[in-house]
Image (cartoon, helix red, strand yellow):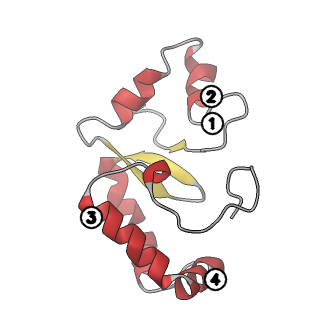
Amino acid sequence: MGRVGLLQLDSVPVVMRTQYLPLFARLGPYDATLLDRVAYRDDEWFETWCHEASLMPVEDEPLMRWHKARAAAGQTWKGLVEFAAANQGYLDEVLDQVRQRPLAPAELVDPRPRDGAWWGDR
């Protein structure tokens, strides 16, 4: 993992979640739970948004501070700004849930009805 430097995350699996595939290509068959154990123990890696959701080594976090500063100043994608403005109550609810305890995105309570059976249908 140390030589990779950045590993793209993708939550929509076709064969398997995308972050496991580059390691398979480099290593061949391996225990896929190894990535989870390495990436999320001892705070050696962190999740960030580069061009995509990614895992990066903690020592590279300063490289992303400019991006975080722009987002904090509202200089982010227009769609995110519009979503935040239109859904402030929902965002406040999500923050309240996250402040109560650590949780996975699937554990968040989403009050909106589903429009269909597919992932993301709202």
Q: Which residue is mark 3?
A: 99
Residue 57: image location, x then y, percent:
36, 44
- Image mark count: 4
Q: Image check: 111 left or right of 102?
A: right
Q: Are marks 1 and 2 in contact (CB under 8 Å)?
A: yes
Quick one: label 4, few (<14), some, or many (20+) residues within 10 Å? Answer: few
Q: Are marks 4 and 1 in contact (CB under 8 Å)?
A: no
Q: Which residue is mark 2?
A: 21
Quick one: label 2, few (<14), some, or many (20+) residues within 10 Å? Answer: some
Q: Nearer the viewer, residue 64 or 72?
A: 72
Quick one: label 3, few (<14), some, or many (20+) residues within 10 Å? Answer: few
Query: At label 2, which amino acid type do we have?
Result: Leu
Q: Which residue is mark 1?
A: 18
Q: Residue at x 32, y 70 (%)?
A: 96
Q: Which residue is mark 4?
A: 78
Q: Residue at x 44, y 51 (%)?
A: 107
Q: Secondary structure at mark 4?
A: helix
Q: Secondary structure at mark 1?
A: loop
Query: At label 3, which amino acid type do we have?
Result: Arg
Spatial distance from mark 1 to mark 2, Cα to Cα? 5 Å
Of the two numbered discs 2 and 4 on the same chain, state the one appearing first in sequence. Answer: 2
Of the two numbered discs 1 and 3 on the same chain, state the one appearing first in sequence. Answer: 1
Q: Secondary structure at mark 3?
A: helix
Task: Name the image quarter holding the N terminus.
Answer: top left
Query: At label 1, which amino acid type do we have?
Result: Thr
Of the two numbered discs 3 and 4 on the same chain, state the one appearing first in sequence. Answer: 4
Mark nearest the camera among 2 and 3 is 3
Query: At label 4, which amino acid type do we have?
Result: Lys
Q: Is residue 48 above or below residue 68?
A: above
Spatial distance from mark 1 to mark 3, Cα to Cα? 29 Å
Q: Residue at x 36, y 50 (%)?
A: 103
